[in-house]
């Protein structure tokens, strides 16, 4: 039973990676260079909001606020909306399609 569970995790992991890769390709075509850079830093490289703000050169005009907090917040919202729009337009099944031309 343990061997079956381990095999299933490996199988699902490969499918999830393939699906995520397809979504990343779609996002790269949809986002501008700066937006994709933020996506990469936040979700691919898994940096903190503060690290992303520093990397992208964001500043804060409000005292007591972390640099770029508002820009990062807005970027996260935009990225979520764009990903949701892709999934809505293409249908979630495109993530599982083996045909790369879809």
Image (cartoon, helix red, strand yellow):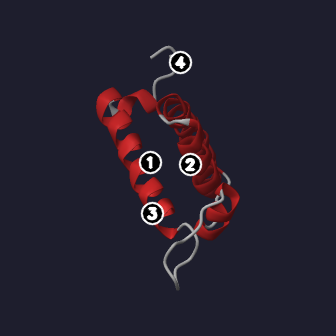
Name the N-terminal-most of marks 4 and 2: 2
Q: For numbered disc 4, what is the local secondary structure?
A: loop
Residue 79 shows which numbered tag? 1
Percent coordinates x, y for residue 97 in the rendering: 46, 24
Q: Position of residue 42 (x, y in %)?
A: 59, 56
Q: Quadrant of the C terminus?
A: top left
Q: Label 2: which residue?
A: 39
Contact between labelled residues 3 and 1, with CB atoms less than 8 Å apart? no
Task: Measure the C-alpha gap from mark 1 to mark 3.
Answer: 10 Å
Count of numbered tags: 4
Which of the 4 image quadrants contains residue 86? top left
Which residue is at the far bottom? Answer: 64
Mark 3 crowd level (few <14, some 14–19, many ≥20, 10 Å Cα): few
- Label 3 sits on a secondary structure element that is helix
Pointer 4 and pointer 2: residues touching (CB < 8 Å)?
A: no
Q: What residue does disc 3 label?
A: 73
Q: Looking at the image, is mark 3 or mark 2 nearer the viewer?
A: 3
Q: Is residue 86 above or below residue 46?
A: above
Residue found 30% across the figure and 35% down from its top? 88
Which of pointers 1 and 3 indicates the residue nearer the eye?
3
Instruction: Write down the residue under mark 4.
Output: 100
Of callouts 3 and 2, the N-terminal one:
2
- Label whose residue precedes the other's in the sequence (1 or 2): 2
Q: Residue at x 56, y 76 (%)?
A: 66
Q: CA distance from mark 3 to mark 2?
A: 12 Å
Do the CB atoms of the residues marked 1 and 2 lie less than 8 Å apart?
A: yes
How far apart are the two marked residues, 1 and 4, measured between alpha carbons?
Answer: 23 Å
What residue appears at the point 62 percent right and 67 percent down from the top-left corner?
48
Q: Nearer the viewer, mark 4 or mark 2?
A: 2
């Amino acid at each position: 039973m343990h061997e079956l569970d381990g095999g299933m995790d490996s199988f699902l992991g490969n499918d999830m990676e393939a699906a995520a890769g397809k979504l990343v390709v779609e996002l790269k075509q949809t986002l501008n260079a700066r937006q994709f850079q933020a996506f990469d830093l936040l979700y691919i490289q898994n940096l903190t909001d503060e690290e992303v703000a520093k990397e992208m050169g964001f500043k804060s005009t409000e005292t007591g606020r972390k640099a770029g907090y508002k820009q990062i917040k807005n970027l996260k919202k935009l990225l979520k909306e764009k990903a949701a729009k892709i999934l809505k337009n293409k249908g979630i099944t495109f993530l599982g399609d083996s045909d790369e031309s879809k």
